[in-house]
Image (cartoon, grey):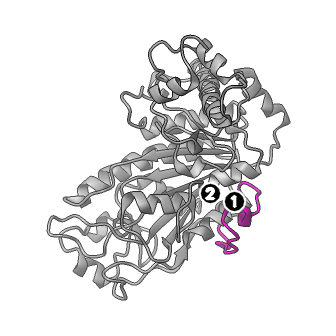
Amino acid sequence: MDTITRRRFLIASGVTGAAALAAGATAYTVNDLLATSADRDDDARILVLVTLYGGNDGLSTVIPYADPAYRAARPGMTYEPGAILTLDGEYGLNPGLTGLHRLYRDRRLAVVQGVGYPRPNRSHFQSMDIWQTAQPDRPGTTGWLGRWLDSAGGDPRLAVSFEPALPPLLAGATSAGATVPGGELALPAGVTSATLTRLAAPEPAASPALARAAACFADLMRVQDMLLGIEEGAAEDETDDDAPATATGGAAPPLDRQLALVARCIEAGAATRVYSVSLGGFDLHADGRDSQQALLARLDQPLTAFTERMTGKGVVTAVYSEFGRRVRANASDGTDHGTASNVFLLGDGVRGGRYGAPPSLTDLDDGDLRHTVDFRDVYATLLADVLGSDPARSLDGWTGRLDGVLG
């Protein structure tokens, strides 16, 4: 290849790891992607995973307002009882979660409390690795949904992320999902779509790893073309207010835009079974109450609208963060890195209510909540009841389940 080699291309693209670029080498057209809807099982469910980066404060999200230990631990951060969106006589939602509160009253939101893992880690990066690999003892190089993708055939169209970089949870041992940033895909100078096609073509002198990595970029462009086609096709039926904002820079697009793209893909009949989206900013070490309420409102509005839009389409959404916060507030009316927190499940087939044993606010582990539900129980339930897969294959033999939450 005269003008550019696979290796030079990958270096210019900033690629540093082959595992996250192990997508198959087949190039797909838009018609290839959408034509799969003809063969799709109408009963097949779809999983949407929402990651809250930064460590969302679970005690200010699902508030134990009736527990005197809550007010004693956080005197400058609590809400007046009338502001809390009550779930029952003990717990209520943050005032920023008005839409989710309505879904809870309609028995469409499941709140799983006390979710964590043994020997918790308070590092953002290490704890997120643990959650995304589902391997608390020693996080590996593959994600729990990446391993599902391996077992499902490895087609990158089955698992799509709308984040700037492929999250570890979608990287498998022999395959990976596709990352489709909300903005335009940026290529190194001098690289065109035609160049990508040549790079993806079989070449005897190239190593298998370099060939797979280059082919991943070709897959990425095909998937992005699909999404642009879906977005343009849907524009005629939508008002300007409904159209998502354009993403700028290298950050993840706003959550409303990510979820709007997910909805359009589902409505267009794309074969994708798993979507990954995210919202960041939850590492609130100071002035945490008002800032978190504003962030939760940014989660609540698009998530509620998405849930309503997807009613009857077999979509289940799970919301989680890498850890919760410590029980006691710090001197800046914020909270520091903690352990167990909440997971929200909502959508078709979800049996609303509170699940899991709420952690004690007085029987603590060095100032932190003791988890009562292993997050692998939640994952196993999603794998079995949403993706129709044997959880043990993706969770290193894990056999636990979260009973009763999905019908």
In-front residue for pair 19/272? 19
Using the image, tell me which numbered label, if any, was put on residue 383: 1
Q: Which residue is drawn at 72% across and 33% down?
A: 269
Q: Which residue is drawn at 80% across and 48% down?
A: 43
Nearer mark to the viewer, of 2 and 1: 2
Q: What element carries label 2?
A: helix
Q: What element carries label 1?
A: helix
Using the image, tell me which numbered label, if any, was put on residue 144: 2
| CB under 8 Å between discs 2 and 1 | yes
| Whole-percent x, y for residue 77 in the image | 22, 67
Q: Quadrant of the C terminus?
A: bottom right
Q: What residue type is labelled 1?
A: Leu
Q: State left or right for residue 248 relative to residue 343.
A: left
Specify the segment rendered in magenta: 386-405
CA neighbours of label 2 inside 10 A, class few (<14), some (14 to 19), many (20+): many
| Whole-percent x, y for residue 307 in the image | 57, 47
Magenta span dominant secondary structure:
loop
